[in-house]
Image (tube, rainbow, N blue to C red):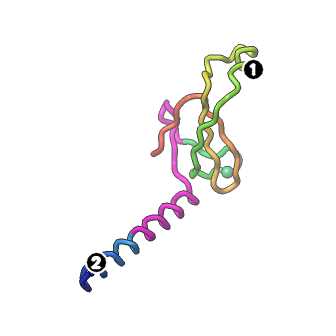
Amino acid sequence: MYYSKEELEKIRKRGENYWQDKMSEEKEKARGYKFQSKNGIQVICVHFKHDHFNRENVLLNTRGLTFLGLDWLNSAATTLICTRCGYIHWFAKEVQQI
Ligand SMILES: [Zn+2]
């Protein structure tokens, strides 16, 4: 199969765009995102007053929670990890990215 010069240029450009997107995605991830809790209050790091986090979903040990009478927490929680100091904030309810 032969590619014309224009086609090769297009392919090269596509690859370049892919890596640029990928890199800005990585950068964004390193910087983190802003979040708010369900009642609309923005999440600020309790330790450092930073406002960018990475979100992770964590499974909780339901058996232990039932024992403690906390089974309303269900089986999943959300953690927001401060991208500046690493402090982990736990949420039993959903948080929204803003
Ligand atoms: Zn922090």
Give the camera-side residue of 87 and 70.
70
Tell whether 85 sits left or right of 74.
right
Q: Nearer the viewer, mark 1 or mark 2?
A: 2
Residue 52: x %, y % from top left: 57, 52
Q: Quadrant of the N terminus?
A: bottom left
Q: Residues within 10 Å of mark 1 (few under 14, many from 20)?
A: few
Q: Secondary structure at mark 2?
A: loop
| Residue located at (58% from left, 49% from top) | 54
Quadrant position of residue 58: top right
| Residue located at (65% from left, 17% from top) | 71
Residue 69: x %, y % from top left: 71, 13
Q: Which mark is residue 78?
A: none
Between the residue at mark 1 and the residue at mark 2, the CA separation in whole angstroms equals: 62 Å
| Residue located at (47% from left, 64% from top) | 22
Give the camera-side residue of 6 and 49.
6
- What residue is disc 2 on? 1
Residue 7: x %, y % from top left: 26, 79
66 shown above or below 10:
above
Q: Quadrant of the C terminus?
A: top left
88 shown above or below 15:
above
Q: Secondary structure at mark 1?
A: helix
Question: Of callouts 1 and 2, which one flags the residue occurring earlier in the amino acid sequence?
Answer: 2
Identify which amino acid the numbered label 1 is placed on. Answer: Gly
Q: Residues within 10 Å of mark 2 (few under 14, many from 20)?
A: few
Identify which amino acid the numbered label 2 is placed on. Answer: Met
In reply to whether residue 63 is colored magenta, the answer given is: no
In reply to whether residue 39 is colored magenta, the answer given is: yes
The span shown in magenta is: 18-42
- What residue is disc 1 on? 64
**Contact between labelled residues 2 and 1, with CB atoms less than 8 Å apart:** no
Quadrant position of residue 5: bottom left
| Residue located at (75% from left, 16% from top) | 68
